[in-house]
Amino acid sequence: MRRQLVIGVLKDTARMLELAGESFYRVRAYNNAVMALLKLDADFEELVQQDRLREIPGVGAGIEQSIREILDTGTTTVYVELAQEIPPTLLDLYNIPGLGTKRIRYLYDTLQITNLGELEYACQENRLLTLKGFGPKSQADILAGIKTLRRYQQSYLYPDALGAALQLKTLLEEITGGKVLVSGELRRGLEVVGKIELLVAGISQGDLPDVPEQSAAGIPVELHFTSKERWGTDAILTTGSAAHIDFLGSLAPDGELPIAASEEECYAQLGLEFIPPELREGILETSRTELPQLLAGLVTDKDLKGVFHNHSNYSDGTNTLAEIAEHGRSLGWSFIGIGDHSQSAIYAGGLNADDLRRQMAEIDEVNAKYSDFKLLKGLEVDILSDGSLDCSDDLLSELDYVIASVHSAFKMSEREMTQRVLKAVSNPHVNMLGHPTGRLLLAREPYAIDLDAVIDACREHDVAIEINANPHRLDLDWRWAHRAYERGVLLAINPDAHSLAGYNDTRYGLNMARKAGLPREVVLNTWDITALLEKFRQKGK
DNA sequence: GCCGTTTTCGGCCCGACTGTTTTCAGTCG
C-alpha cells in the first residue's frame, strides 16, 4: 500500500514539475522512477528497510530522498514548493483526453482556469474558442471528457476496492471478534464497483464506536449486520445482484429466502447447488436445467497451464526470458507465451525482424534446459490503420502463434475500425485478437467497433479472442466473452505481464472468464501444450 | 534527475494522428 502512495506522489510531482516548466529530463526522471516502481518485483518494504532503494533502476539520490519524504510525511518538499506556484487541482485536468501539459498550462495562464469546474464553465461560455489552437471540436471534446470523468469518479477498479475492503475486514474482525464478509459487487468480482459492502455478524451498528463511511481511498462503505443464524441468508442477500435475488425468490414458496446459517444450506433449501459469487448476476445461473453443467464445466485456477501474451526485456517488459521461464515453472505452469511488441510500437521498443529472430533463438536456448516447461514464440503484432500487420507474413510464419492488437488511431469510425480488425483477423497467420476494444476502465472508452462482426470473423478464421487480464482493461468484457463462446469462439486469458508481478493479474482474467460462464475447454490456457501447438500449426504455422 | 564513463559531464526514444492551421504544435501510445 505504501508503494502505491509513493507512486501516486511521484507521479503528481512529475506533473507539477512539468506544469512549472521544469526540464523535460528532470520530469522524465520522475516518470521513469514511477515506471520502475510499478514494475518492481522485489519487496518494496524490504528495500526501504534495508536502505537499498538505490538499487531500483531510475532511483538516484534525489528520488530516494523524495521517497523517504513521502514515507515520512506523505508528500515531498519539491511538491509542496511547487504547490505554492501551481494549483494542484490542475492535475485533475490531465484526466481529460486531449489535454496535456502545454494546453493545461495555457488554460491556466490565459483564462486562469485552475480546476475542472472552472474549465467546464469556460467551455459552456464558449471562452475556449478565443484561444489559439482551440476550436469548436476541442471545446466539445473537453466538455464530453469532463462528463465522462464525473461518471468515472463514482466508480473504482476491482483491485483497488478489494484491497481497501480487505483492510476494513481485518479492522472489523479485530473490533468485533466475529465473522466479516466482503459482499456486494466486490464479491461478485465486477470489474468496477461503486462501493465496498461488508457483512458483519454478532454485533449491531450501535456497538461499533466509529463506523467508517468510506475507506481511506475515499470509496463509500456500506455495512450490513446479521446474526450467526441468518449468516447464510444475508450473505446471499448482500452479495447477489437484484436479478439473482429475484431468481432465488421465485424458487421459494413464499418468495422469501429460507433462513440458514450457511449459504450452501440456503441454496440447498431452494433445491440448488452452491452458486459461486461471480455467477450471481441473475444472467447465466437462472436456468435450473443448465446450472449443473455450467458449474461442473466452469474453468478454475487449477485448469490453467499457462498464458500467451506477455512482454520481456526485448520490448517494454523488465525481465529476461530465463527469468520469465523460471517464474512460469514456479507458478506450476507448463508454458508461457512471449508476445512482445512489433516494430511500429517505437515507444515500447518494438521488435524488428532481427530482434525477433534473436529472441526466437534465445527461446530455443532457454527451452533446451527444461523438459517440463516451454516458452512459446509469439508476437503482439500491431494492427496498422489499414488493417495490415506490422510484420511480414514470412516472419510471422516462423512463430508459434501471433496475437494481433490495435495500439494506434483509436478515433476511427465504427465502420472503418471494424473493417480494419476484420482484415487483420483474416490474415492466416493470426491466432489471437488482443484487447479487442482498447478500453481502459475508468480512463478511456472502448473504441467504436462492431463486436458482433468481429466475433463472427474470429469464428470464421479460427482466431481466439483475448480476455486481457490487466485490471485496467479486462477486455474482452465478460458479457461479450459469453457471447463469443456461444458463437463458438475460443478465448484466452492473458495477463499482458510486463514484470513477474504482472502474472498475478491472471486471476482477474480468470474471474472474468468465470463470470462469462466459460467451460474449461474453450479457454486456450487449459489446453495441453502439444494440442495447442498442433492447433496453431494447423493454421499454417 | 539519472546514468555511465577509456568517469563527475553530456546525453537522455520517436512517429503518427488530430485539430488546428496554412505550416504546425500538442497529445498519445
Image (cartoon, rainbow, N blue to C red):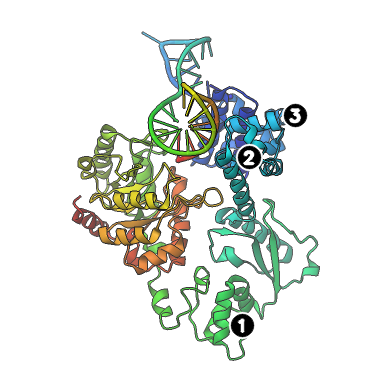
The residue at the far bottom in this view is A253
Q: Indicate the chain on which mark 1 is placed.
A: A
Which residue is under mark 3?
A84
Seen from the viewer's position, the closer of residues A77 and A319 is A77
Which residue is under mark 2?
A93
Frontmost of labels 1 and 3 is: 3
Is A12 drawn above or below residue A376 in the view shown? above
Marks 3 and 2: same chain?
yes
Q: Is residue A67 visible?
A: no
Q: Indicate the chain on which mark 2 is placed.
A: A
Residue A290 coordinates in the image, percent (x, y): 41, 80
Residue kind at label 3, given as amino acid type: Gln
Question: Which secondary structure lies at badge 2?
Answer: helix
- What's the residue at 47%, 66% (across, down)? A515
Residue kind at label 2, given as amino acid type: Leu
Please tell me how many numbered marks the rendered image carries: 3
Q: What is the number of the mark on residue A260?
A: 1
Question: Which secondary structure lies at badge 1?
Answer: loop
Seen from the viewer's position, the closer of residues B24 and A318 is B24
- Which of the marked residues, 2 or 1, is nearer the chain's N terminus? 2
Badge 2: how crowded within 10 Å, few (<14), some, or many (20+)? many
